Amino acid sequence: MHTKNITYNKVPIKVSIRSDADDSVFNEIFIERDYKDLEPTIKNATNQIIDIGGHTGMFAIYARTLNPSVPITTYEPSQENFTTLKENLKQNHIKNIQAKNLAISDKQGQATLYLSEDSHNHSLTEKTKKSDKTQITQTTTLDRIIKAQTDLVKIDAEGAEFEIIESAPIETLRLIKTIYIEYHQNPPTPLTQKLQKAGFHTKTTPSHYDKSMGFILATA
């Protein structure tokens, strides 16, 4: 493990890097700025930001550099990732981000998390599993974590995004201003149809690297 340092939006950041997967996420967020289209939304947010698939906390820290006061909650089911997430929040002296060791799914309870060799590819969906290692994780649902107006929900759940959105009540989705989803393995049509039914305008961008993946930006 080593540490990478960067100053983003005039805020110094220090992040623990365990592997090439961590390094890739760091570069995507802070160097390549994969979430740059969300920066105006984050900067102007006054209602909560929800980060589903928090990995080691880099997106949450990134959002905090752009907005020092908005409530942020990050959810990460992998115990190993969650431990590093907490370390990253601590070493950046960030106390106002809530971190929860939970998976968001279509039900409340427990589920099997399929652990990938790459720490950013762990998945609740057996269809996308990439190793034989597993972990039992606690799960909850979108309607249980969103009870009030929410300015942004970012979802990177390695296939579980379909369960998360399709099981969410329309009334819950209508509490959200912007949803940004990385979709995996499936055509995104069920997601966009549900979001449009809830009143969102959707923009779908296929990944340049893998045509089975891509991104959905949904704005109310």
Image: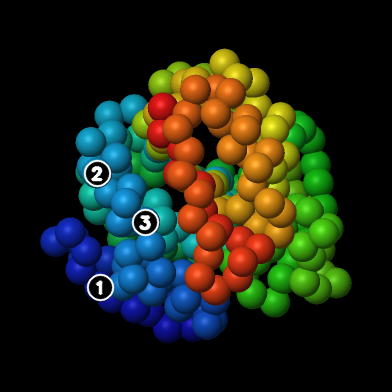
Residue receiving disc 3: 35
**Of tags 3 and 1, which is closer to the observer?**
3
Q: Does the rendering let one see residue 168?
A: yes
Tag 1: Cα neighbours inside 10 Å, few (<14), some, or many (≥20)?
some
Residue 15 in view in this figure:
no
- Closer to the camera in the image, 72 or 41: 41
Give the class, few, some or many, for how many residues have Cα within 10 Å of label 3's Cα (few <14, many ≥20): some
Q: Amino acid at mark 3?
A: Tyr
Residue 20's mark?
A: none
Q: What is the CA distance from the residue labelled 3 to the residue labelled 2?
A: 10 Å
User: Residue 132, how many percent across, how many down?
Assistant: 85, 72
Determine which of the numbered discs, if any, sits on residue 40 in the image. 2
Residue at image point 68% right, 39% down: 190
Q: Earlier in the sequence, mark 3 or mark 1?
A: 1
For numbered disc 3, what is the local secondary structure? loop
Q: Amino acid under label 2?
A: Pro
- Residue drawn at the location 50% of the way across and 49% of the way down: 204
Q: What amino acid type should be assigned to the residue bearing mark 1?
A: Ile
* Picture layout, residue 120 above or below residue 111: below
Q: Residue 66 at x, y = what percent? A: 23, 49
* Residue, disc 1: 6
Look at the image and tell me in which quarter the C terminus lies: top left
Label 2 environment density (alpha carbons within 10 Å; few <14, some 14–19, many ≥20) = few
The residue lying at 49 percent from left, 22 percent from top is: 199
Which mark is nearer the camera, 1 or 2? 2
Q: Earlier in the sequence, mark 1 or mark 2?
A: 1
Element under disc 2: helix
Does 40 sit left or right of 103 as displayed? left
Distance between mark 3 and mark 1 Cα atoms: 17 Å
Q: Secondary structure at mark 1?
A: strand
- Measuring from the top left, give residue 86's x and y in whole percent: 47, 57
